[in-house]
Image (cartoon, rainbow, N blue to C red):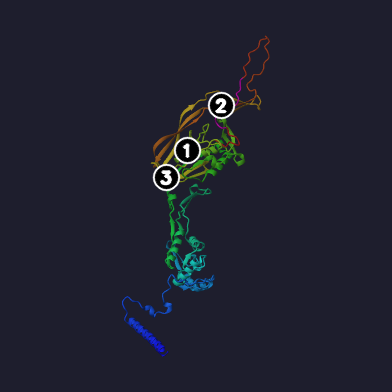
Amino acid sequence: MGKKKAKVAVTVLLCIMVAALAGTGVLYLMNNPIEGLDLGFLSKKEDELPAASEDQPMETIEVDPDRFIEGITVSGIDVGGMTMNEARKALFPLRKTLIKSVGYELVYEEKDISLPGNTMNLGIECNDAYVLNKAFDLGHEEMGEEELQELLNDVKHNGREFEIGLEINEEELYDKAINDLSSLIDVEVQDATVTLDKEAEDPEKMFMYTNAVTGYELDRKAFIEMIKNNLEEEKYSGKIELPVIVTEPKIQDGAPTTEIVKRSSFSTYFGSGHLARNTRVFNIKKAVGFINGTIVAPGETFSTNETIGPRTYALGWQPAPAIVDGGASEDQAGGGVCQVSTTMYNAVVMADLEIVHRQGHSSRISYVDGGLDATINTGTIDFKWKNNTGSNVYVIMYVNDEEKKVYCDIYGEPFKGDFDAITLSSKKLKTLSPSGDVEYRVDNSKPASYKENYASRKDGSVWQSYRNYYKDGQIIKTEPYVKTTYPARNGIVIVGKGYGQPTPTKPASSGTKSPTKEPEKTKEPEKTAEPAPTENSGGGGE
């Protein structure tokens, strides 16, 4: 037994000596390291040792459904383990600082506009709610357990950083800043214009001029992009020059006054004979009232019938002489309006405008030379002309009661040719004689003794009109314009039933019959090519 105890003691002593020698060696190596040999692990604590190898099992982490997972920070603030309300409170000071940092100066020097632009009126909001919701979703999405644990371990050890910032609520921006700025900046562009005051007593003062206005409009899209770019670059203050779209008017100030001239003026007289009849003058003034102040745009066609409307008694037109079937004169609703169309026709030709449709009367009239008239009739005959210039044409018509004249003045742009005025003249080319007998028409409602000279037998004529061009008061050329034919009239007589038949005589005493005259044949009324106006379709007039 004594030997065993001695042997064990020797063994223990040897172990102690080996441990001592090992410790001495380690100390020596630590103080005298061998190149390439890392013994640093010997001095590290347990929590500083390297992570377990991939073969080692991952740490199992539980997820609290009401709290952010560990490792999440928002703009440098650790929100791991916080509830949503706790995270909001933690971020509130930063959110408040960001919002208060916005202070732009919105300027538009052209209109001397300078306004403060803050988060309220610019619709700038902090996106902290959106960012917190996005951060909270991390680790709370539906996924497999292994995938979830990998995510939780990764976020816990490596972290996840989210940043809050400022962004634009465009709806708020429109409701506030853009609408306010637009009310200060936006101006609709307007061309210099000319309108006519029909109530002006002096025709020369009928023109009313409006100056041109330059258009301004806040460029909303560009303005929003400027705000967004500043926020992205974290430029929360400074001047912002408002982007404005400037539109210059097409017609500048002065253009209407310098480009509008009186191209022509023509008048006709109505102060004698049947022309001066009160009802006829009434119709002339009524028609003039519809036409006066008409503005005809470039390329537009003017229709006399469309402008003055149908001539009927129901519409207030008065009875006055009108030329009807076969050249007869008869009272019609609106009689006399042809003097208005004729006056305008001469003015339009002298203004060098395009005639679309013109028809002469069936008989010559007294208030203009032959070939210079233009008849109209409701629903059948119209006088039309077209504005063949590049600018508006203004028609001014009026009646001068003292002179007993109706005037038509045409205004528009200056003539484009080598002339500055046109006159219209005419010449009779030949006379046309009636080619047949007087026409007798039977009116069965009249007695046999009735006889009425309805339309006189008269010669016709052919007229050539001319346009005469002037420059500085001197005629420079004359050109043939149009020919007008007024047909000869055989005349029309209205007779009663049985007119012209002989009275029966008694037989002679010798028993022989005395010769009797062959009854004169009467003709039925003939239809003519010319329309015969009635109360409902009339309104031609001399």
Disc 2/disc 1 C-alpha distance (Å): 33 Å
Q: Position of residue 27 (x, y in %)?
A: 35, 83
Q: Quadrant of residue 112?
A: bottom left
Instruction: Identify the image quadrant of the N terminus.
Output: bottom left
Residue that label 3 marks: 414
**Front-lying residue, 421 or 314:** 314
Name the residue tied to disc 1.
355
The residue segment tinted magenta is: 520-531
Task: Say which amino acid is labelled 2.
Answer: Gly
Question: Is residue 502 rendered to the left or right of residue 428?
Answer: right
Q: Secondary structure at mark 2?
A: loop
> Dot 1 lies on which element?
strand
Main SS of the magenta part reads: loop
The answer to the question of whether label 1 and label 3 lie on touching residues, with beta carbons closer than 8 A, is no
Q: Of the residues shown, which amino acid type is indicated by label 3?
A: Pro
* Amino acid type, residue under disc 1 in the picture: Ile
Give the camera-side residue of 116 and 162. Answer: 162
The mark closer to the camera, 2 or 1, is 1
Residue 424: x and y in percent read 45, 37
Comes first in the chain, label 3 or label 2: 3
Q: Is residue 233 above or below residue 46?
A: above
**Mark 1 surroundings: few (<14), some (14-19) or many (≥20) residues within 10 A:** some
Q: Is residue 527 magenta?
A: yes
Question: Quarter of the image containing the C terminus?
Answer: top right
Q: Which residue is mark 2?
A: 491
Quadrant hosting residue 264: top left
Residue 350: give x, y in percent of width and height: 45, 40
> Can residue 112 be seen in the rendering of this structure?
no
